[in-house]
Image (tube, helix red, strand yellow):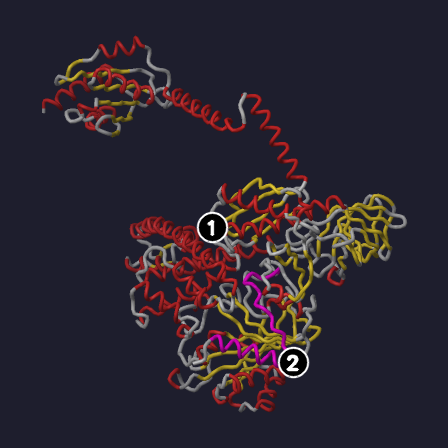
């Protein structure tokens, strides 16, 4: 048996020996790619290289990429747990060539690795090629030596690969493994479990545009992908991925928690789904994705709810998934070190979401019962798909639950309508993601332009105008009074990126002067200057002098450096699970969103603020240097998941306190910040907290203003600072007491109270007051009845047609002195009186009340109540 750690080592060493650069797995969140919800293939991080939009320092690469497939063309969701080889989260081993070697070497490398290093018998390997790819067929037969009968031509569905609806694509060749006669006949046909695809070699020759047209890539390339889980199953000699060392410990732990037999055939699907989904949850949360109602967070929530559903089938009650995430961390942390510092956070997020789901599931069951009962009463054959989807989407009520419960009553479900509603939801998620990640509006020919940024150290630079756009259209130049977008060959203006706002400033040519209001970046690398031409005219090809506003740039740098320090302090105080989930760095303030499972307490905020200000006073040097990406990450530099990084990255560090990958502008030393002040903490979304803060002069002015207001308040109330809070709390308490008294209404005039007390008549030796108070509200009746019963040490039954209700409805209250509740029960009294006014009521033994129809005869009701009390006691 070959452990998965050895499979990884062999794979990396083989391709590194053949000149491939080892590249770290990119996150599950695709960097700046609105076409994907998740990274679903090893080539995703190289898409820009295949399209020649970016360059790397190598032409060959090898990776083991973490992937998710839960939607779109490459969607294995419905197969998960039911087959031996499908997963939501999986790892893809891949080797890549960017315009270097092509088909022949790709096939030779794959064959050599499988047969000579993994020692798979050559006679058990079968090949498929695209139906029209004669070149690939010849390579396998003539150069590699695979017999013709083990090479099959297939159509576009099976042997033409593309990442998504658009982007790089090409014919592919798949290598399949023959598992032997115990798994099926020796017929290479679709659906035969005997043959398992293990490696897909994609010959990247084209790019598909939104219209579906294929365009040849400038340099044909290679993209291969081999599932770690499938390869492990074959090399470890087991029949299912779920039997490999990647899953076995996790499934054993699940069986232990459920007190079941891990090998019970009836429980395999449930065990497999739980194991697969908890792996996905662990990696998604580690990559900064939190439960939500749309986008990636919705997928995470759906995975968790599906896992809980299958856990309940294993008789796992309450929250249990969070107890399994630690097993995933333990198994995978040698290969993904980011998991260990997030172990506790991952478990807490899962536990909180599980508990929330269990509550909503209980609510959903009540609604489902109503739907089912309605269907039975109306003799419907099926439950409506839209209703079932609402139950699933809003309450997390699994469709499988609904189907099984409905079948018990002989009712079907409208599965097609459910699927349509689900597809609509998926489309909304995708559109939501694209809307959030919308790039610069398409400007004609913008992709052919590139601007060199020279503004880290110099705020002024000479440049040449490359292109001008007026109202989104390319123009030969720009005239006085016009607004437009200008692109220069080089610029000191920082374009909005990584949360930092774009620079502003000015520029001038020999006959022109213009204001730069904002700076953004096009996907291809052109820096776009949004300008107003104040004077003269500029033509493409003209030389200009560009000048960044130095004061604004300094304030932005102050807030950006402070943001890094805030991030470091949060990780120090709250834990290493804290990750940036969004930010805005401007000249006036900063906003920082981060992963955390609960509100940050006042004490924790104070610690964070103090830590940042201590490091400001320490005047730490801000070191900025470039180094290889992998080296930077391994040294502890924090990468922001939705940012896209090249081979060489810029690392901004402040001693041992903070170290991040960042392309933004910063100070030379932390002391230049001067002061840091947190002004707000709130929830941004589920599992995401937000801090707003000020730095530098903005922080000083904020404190100055607030101290001035404090001094005015102290002077107004004649208090010292230490006594102000107790003084204000005293005012608040007295104010609340006054409000209570106002709500009770004014006390009854002494004469009225005395008159009522004096009207008491003995019933069974107990003083009883029965009286009408026309127009009184509930509060007045209640308070007056209590006063009477306490004064008389007896019973008070008061009633009125209330003007407060607006419709004249009647009110009755009964109040019994507590020492008499064994003899007279206010609740029983009200139960007898309520029918007299066609109403309902109830309460305690010492106090009860009722409401009903307007009382036409107040005196008559008084007599009826007295008679009822006497008869009740006599009985």
**Label 2 CA crowd tier, 10 Å (few <14, some 14–19, many 20+):** many
How far is mark 2 from mark 1, CA to CA? 48 Å
Q: SS at mark 2?
A: loop
Relative to 341, 649 lies left or right: right
Vertical side of 294 occupied by 811: above or below = above
Q: Which mark is residue 597?
A: 1
Q: Nearer the viewer, residue 783 or 418?
A: 783
Q: Residue furthest left?
A: 875
Q: SS at mark 1?
A: loop
Relative to 179, 703 lies left or right: right
**Label 1 CA crowd tier, 10 Å (few <14, some 14–19, many 20+):** some
At x 24%, y 29%, the residue is: 844
At x 60%, y 31%, the residue is: 707
Residue 822 screen position, x and y as percent = 15, 27
**Which quadrant would residue 137 be assigned to in this image?**
bottom right
**Stretch of the chain drawn in magenta:** 4-32
| Closer mark to the observer between disc 2 and disc 1 | 1
Vertical side of 867 occupied by 660: above or below = below
Q: Which residue is mark 2?
A: 102
Vertical side of 847 occupied by 396: above or below = below
Vertical side of 484 occupied by 48: above or below = below
Q: Nearer the viewer, residue 615 or 117?
A: 615
């Amino acid at each position: 048996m070959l452990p998965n750690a050895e499979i990884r080592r062999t794979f990396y060493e083989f391709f590194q020996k053949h000149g491939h650069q080892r590249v770290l797995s990119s996150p599950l969140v695709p960097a700046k790619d609105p076409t994907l919800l998740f990274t679903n293939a090893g080539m995703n991080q190289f898409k820009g290289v295949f399209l020649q939009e970016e360059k790397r320092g190598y032409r060959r690469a090898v990776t083991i990429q973490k992937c998710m497939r839960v939607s779109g063309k490459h969607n294995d969701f419905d197969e998960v747990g039911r087959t031996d080889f499908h997963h939501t989260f999986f790892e893809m081993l891949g080797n890549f060539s960017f315009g270097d070697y092509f088909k022949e070497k790709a096939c030779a490398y794959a064959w050599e690795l499988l047969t000579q290093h993994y020692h798979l018998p050559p006679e058990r390997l079968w090949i498929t090629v695209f139906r029209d790819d004669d070149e690939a067929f010849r390579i396998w037969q003539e150069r590699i030596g695979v017999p013709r009968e083990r090479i099959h031509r297939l159509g576009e569905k099976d042997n033409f690969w593309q990442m998504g609806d658009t982007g790089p694509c090409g014919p592919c060749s798949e290598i399949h493994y023959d598992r032997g006669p115990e798994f099926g006949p020796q017929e290479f046909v679709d659906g035969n479990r005997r043959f398992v695809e293990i490696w897909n070699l994609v010959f990247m020759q084209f790019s598909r545009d939104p219209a579906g047209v294929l365009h040849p890539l400038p340099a044909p390339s290679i993209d291969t992908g081999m599932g770690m889980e499938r390869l492990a199953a074959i090399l470890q000699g087991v029949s299912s991925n779920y039997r490999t060392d990647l899953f076995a410990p996790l499934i054993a732990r699940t069986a232990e928690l459920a007190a079941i037999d891990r090998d019970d055939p009836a429980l395999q699907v449930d065990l497999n789904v739980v194991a697969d989904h908890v792996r996905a949850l662990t990696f998604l949360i580690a990559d900064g994705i939190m439960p939500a109602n749309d986008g990636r967070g919705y997928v995470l929530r759906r995975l968790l709810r599906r896992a809980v559903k299958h856990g309940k089938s294993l008789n796992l009650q309450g929250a249990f998934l969070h107890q399994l995430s630690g097993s995933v961390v333990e198994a995978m942390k040698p290969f993904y070190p980011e998991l260990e510092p997030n172990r506790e956070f991952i478990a807490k997020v899962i536990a909180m979401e599980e508990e929330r789901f269990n509550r909503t599931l209980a609510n959903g069951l009540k609604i489902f019962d109503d739907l089912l009962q309605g269907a039975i009463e109306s003799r419907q054959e099926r439950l409506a798909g839209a209703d079932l989807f609402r139950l699933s989407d809003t309450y997390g009520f699994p469709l499988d639950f609904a189907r099984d419960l409905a079948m018990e009553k002989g009712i079907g479900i409208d599965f097609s309508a459910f699927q349509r509603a689900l597809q609509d939801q998926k489309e909304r998620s995708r559109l939501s993601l694209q809307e959030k990640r919308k790039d610069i509006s398409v400007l004609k020919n913008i992709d052919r332009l590139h601007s060199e940024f020279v503004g880290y150290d110099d705020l002024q630079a000479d440049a040449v105008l490359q292109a001008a756009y007026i109202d989104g259209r390319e123009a030969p130049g720009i005239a006085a009074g016009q607004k437009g977008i200008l692109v220069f060959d080089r610029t000191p203006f920082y374009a909005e990126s990584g949360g930092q706002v774009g620079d502003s400033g000015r520029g001038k040519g020999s006959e022109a002067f213009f204001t730069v209001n904002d700076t953004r970046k096009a996907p291809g690398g052109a820096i776009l200057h949004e300008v107003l031409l104040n004077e003269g005219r500029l033509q493409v090809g003209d030389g200009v002098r560009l000048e960044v506003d130095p004061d604004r740039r300094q304030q932005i740098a102050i807030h950006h450096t402070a943001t890094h320090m805030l991030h470091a302090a949060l990780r120090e105080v709250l834990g290493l699970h804290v990750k940036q989930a969004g930010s805005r760095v401007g000249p006036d303030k900063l906003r920082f969103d981060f992963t955390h499972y609960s509100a940050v307490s006042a004490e924790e905020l104070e610690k964070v603020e103090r830590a940042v200000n201590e490091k400001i006073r320490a005047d730490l040097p801000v070191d900025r240097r470039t180094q290889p990406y992998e080296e930077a990450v391994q040294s502890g530099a924090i990468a922001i998941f939705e940012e896209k990084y090249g081979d060489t990255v810029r690392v901004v560090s402040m001693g041992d306190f903070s170290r991040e990958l960042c392309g933004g502008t910063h100070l030379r030393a932390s002391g230049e910040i001067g002061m840091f002040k947190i002004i707000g903490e709130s929830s941004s979304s589920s599992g995401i907290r937000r801090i707003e803060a000020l730095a530098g002069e903005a922080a000083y002015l904020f404190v100055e203003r607030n101290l001035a207001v404090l001094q005015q308040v102290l002077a107004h109330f004649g208090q010292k600072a230490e006594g102000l809070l107790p003084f204000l709390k005293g005012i608040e308490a007295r104010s609340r007491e006054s409000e209570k008294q106002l709500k009770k209404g004014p006390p009854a005039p002494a004469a009225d109270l005395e008159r009522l007390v004096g009207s008491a008549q003995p019933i069974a030796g107990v003083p009883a007051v029965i009286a009408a108070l026309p127009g009184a509200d509930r509060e007045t009746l209640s308070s007056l009845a209590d006063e009477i019963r306490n004064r008389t040490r007896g019973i008070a039954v008061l009633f009125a047609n209330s003007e407060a209700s607006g419709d004249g409805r009647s009110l009755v209250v009964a109040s019994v002195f507590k020492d008499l509740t064994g003899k007279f029960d206010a609740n029983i009294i009200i139960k007898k009186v309520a029918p007299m006014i066609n109403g309902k009521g109830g309460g305690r033994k010492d106090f009860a009340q009722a409401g009903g129809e307007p009382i036409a005869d107040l005196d008559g009701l008084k007599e009826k109540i007295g008679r009822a009390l006497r008869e009740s006691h006599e009985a």
